[in-house]
Amino acid sequence: MIYLQLLWSFTKIGFTSFGGISMIPLILDEMSSHGWMTAAEISDIVAIAEMTPGPLGLNCATFAGIRVAGILGAVAANLGVLMPTFTICAAAAFFFEKFHSSPVLKRIMVGVRPVGLGLVTAVIINLILSNYYTDGSVEWICVAIGALACVLLIKFKVSIPKIIAIAAALGIIFFR
Amino acid sequence: MSPLQLFLVFFKIGIFTFGGGWSIVAQMQNEFADSKKLLTQEDLLDIVSLGRSLPGTMAGNVAWLFGFRQAGVIGGIAALLGVTTPPLLILAVITVFYSAAKTNVYFAAAMKGVRATVAPIIFSALLRLWKSAFPKPLCYAIYAGAAALSFFLKISAVYLILAGVVIGLFFGGDAKAKAGEGGKEGGR
């Protein structure tokens, strides 16, 4: 049954990946072995997934699911990608809350928190490189939109939905 | 928070989580740490580090971790459904109008503008998380090491977090207990 196949394929993808771009080779494997999507479609969906809200894995699941078996297929594929959250993350959440105030966990988190911050920093640098610098040249309009967003966010505490709406409007004005 | 509230707030967050799971951090700061005081910056950094290092999608994991803390398993499910439903609906529409969306100049132009804000959004989150991570001088070294290994060598977040666990276990003791406590905006 097609829904179960989708669920199982995307469960495998969910468990063997840790989000974002790391999912792509697995998605490519699963999709081409079933003949569900071509490599070209996958690179399109990666581009679309980057433009739309939501995790890449879920967006791929939705796209492939709908193409293969309609909206229910999309739901089945999404559930597959979320399976690690229902199981491993749920268990981790349980233990994390249970030992929340344990001195050992407190010690551990002293080492983990700076790593978390380091990961955020690396992500920001990667995003700066990919969003402001394309084909060997700096995209100054993007830099200006980014600088404006920084000022609005940090100085004026403008909310994120408003920032996104403003940036979309500016994008249409300058890039259309 | 009740499961229904969790669903609704995460639904809103799900609409605006562009560019991967990290921008969810800035939104959770706005929704939970600033106005409602449900979360300190330290708690948020813990949830995010944990969510990132577990298998599956980061935004989903983070939503579950927060929802579970607020309202148990039902809360976890509510938050998870909330954050995943908007992308499902939006992408369903885009998939149906796939070829039109792919070539629509207005859509592409608007999204190019939006992408330019993803780094600033995450950066604003970083500024506010900053103070919660450095109770000891050693933490600055861990931070710099993790950032460099992740950026230059593309070492997986999982291994880096595990390294953080080990370092914390051995050297994380006798940090000043109140370290950080969710530093207010702060001028960094």
Image: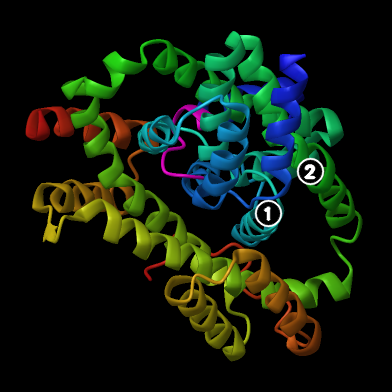
Q: Quadrant of residue B49?
A: bottom right
Q: Label 1 crowding class (10 Å Cα cut-off): few <14, some 14-19, many 20+?
A: many
Give amino acid for label 2.
Arg
Q: Is residue B19 magenta?
A: yes
Q: Where does residue B113 sit, x and y in percent of width and height? A: 22, 38
Q: Are marks 2 and 1 in contact (CB under 8 Å)?
A: yes
Mark 2 vs mark 1: which is more N-terminal? 1
Compared across the picture, whether A103 is left or right of A28 comes to right
Compared across the picture, whether B2 is left or right of A100 comes to left
The N terminus of chain B: image quadrant: top right
Q: Where does residue B76 sit, x and y in percent of width and height? A: 77, 34
Which portion, as a residue range, is magenta? Answer: B13-20
What residue would you read off at disc 2? B69
Q: Is residue A129 above or below residue A20?
A: below
Residue occupying the point 28% across, 23% down? B102
Marking on residue A101: none
Q: Is residue B129 above or below residue B66?
A: below
- Nearer the observer, B188 or B143: B143
What residue would you read off at disc 1? B47
Q: Visible in this render: residue B31?
A: no
Q: Where does residue B74 sit, x and y in percent of width and height? A: 83, 28
Main SS, magenta region, reads loop
Residue occupying the point 11% across, 59% down? A137
Secondary structure found at label 2: helix
